Image (tube, rainbow, N blue to C red):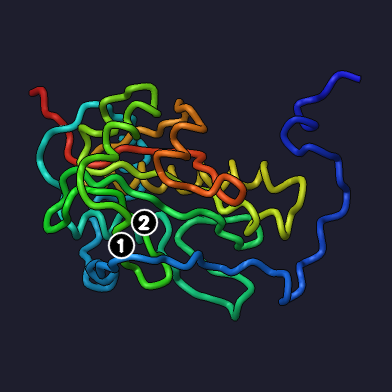
Amino acid sequence: MKQTVLDILALSHTKEMTPQPSSTTRPPLFTPMEGTKLPLPKPQQLTPPSMALHEAITQRRSHRKFSQEPLSLEALSYALWMTQGVKKVVDDRATFRMVPSAGARHAFETYLLINQVDTLSPGLYVYDAQTHALVLLEEGKAKAHSLMMACHQQRMVTDAAVCFFWVAQVERMSARYAQRSARYLLLDAGHIAQNLYLVATAQDLGTCAIGAFEDVELNEALGLNLSEQTVLYAAPYGPLERTE
């Protein structure tokens, strides 16, 4: 029998949702972060952009040309907070963040290739959403080339001040939604990327969502455990190259 679109997306036509896992089988809400932790400016200390939501939505677009101007640490902190910031933790069952997520599972971790950000050394980092801090995974520019090559040699990965990589912690979603988790992970990735687009527009910065990359090469470049994690989406972010 020929597969339908729903078969491909959902993998099965399960009419009943998977029961909530018990506390003994529930995966942790946060992935333990090992490495040098660098606190970010606190969300309450950041000044929100003045642009109206209507204006940000109507002006939103993809940008692929970035300047060599560094991004401020405050701007990076704001972008991370508005895409994956934790507003509330409910026991060990759920987190409420700045974006919606199926069942409040929030199964994504944000990896960052830092190219030019004030006060930060270039390198590969991961966002610790639980404490609103960065964790340095590998200092230096060695990772930049391999990440760019894995993204089909798209130079904006290394030209932009920073490049976001959204990595799915699959079990955090699949423990609740089993076969339908693949669908929900893809939806959640879109929610996160859209928030980054709106934040970029409001801050007079640029971004461009990237879905074109070699899965195995990019996962390996990020040092991911492929039995538990996979990168689903990416986006460069930073000051734009001005042609006027």
Mark 1: few/some/many CA within 10 Å (<14, 14-19, 20+): many
Residue 33 versus residue 62: which sits nearer the camera?
A: 33
Q: Regarding mark 2 in the picture, which secondary structure is present there?
A: strand
Residue 145 located left or right of residue 102: left
Q: Secondary structure at mark 1?
A: strand
Q: Which mark is residue 180?
A: none
Relative to residue 132, is residue 125 depicted above or below? above
Task: For the residues labelled 1 and 2, say whether their Cβ atoms are less than 8 Å apart.
Answer: yes
Question: Residue 106 occupies which quadrant of the picture?
Answer: bottom right
Viewer-proximal residue, 86 or 223? 223
Q: How many marks?
A: 2
- Which residue is found at the position 81% from the left and 25% from the top? 4
Q: Which residue is mark 2?
A: 126
Q: Check disc 2 and give the amino acid type.
A: Val
Label 1 and label 2: CA atoms lie apart by: 6 Å
Which residue, as the protein is rendered here, is positioned at the far bottom?
A: 91
Residue drawn at the location 60% of the way across and 51% of the way down: 228
- Considering depth in this image, is 55 or 120 the residue closer to the camera? 120
Left-right relation of 194 to 91: left
> Dividing the picture into quarters, in which one does residue 234 lie?
top left
Q: Provide the residue designation for mark 1.
A: 134
Question: Which numbered disc flags the more N-terminal residue, 1 or 2?
Answer: 2
Amino acid at dot 1: Leu
Other residues around mark 2 within 10 Å, as few (<14) / some (14–19) / many (≥20):
many
Q: Position of residue 156 (x, y in %)?
A: 26, 29
Q: Is residue 74 left or right of residue 133?
A: left
* Quadrant including the N terminus: top right
- Residue 77 position in % (x across, y down): 27, 60
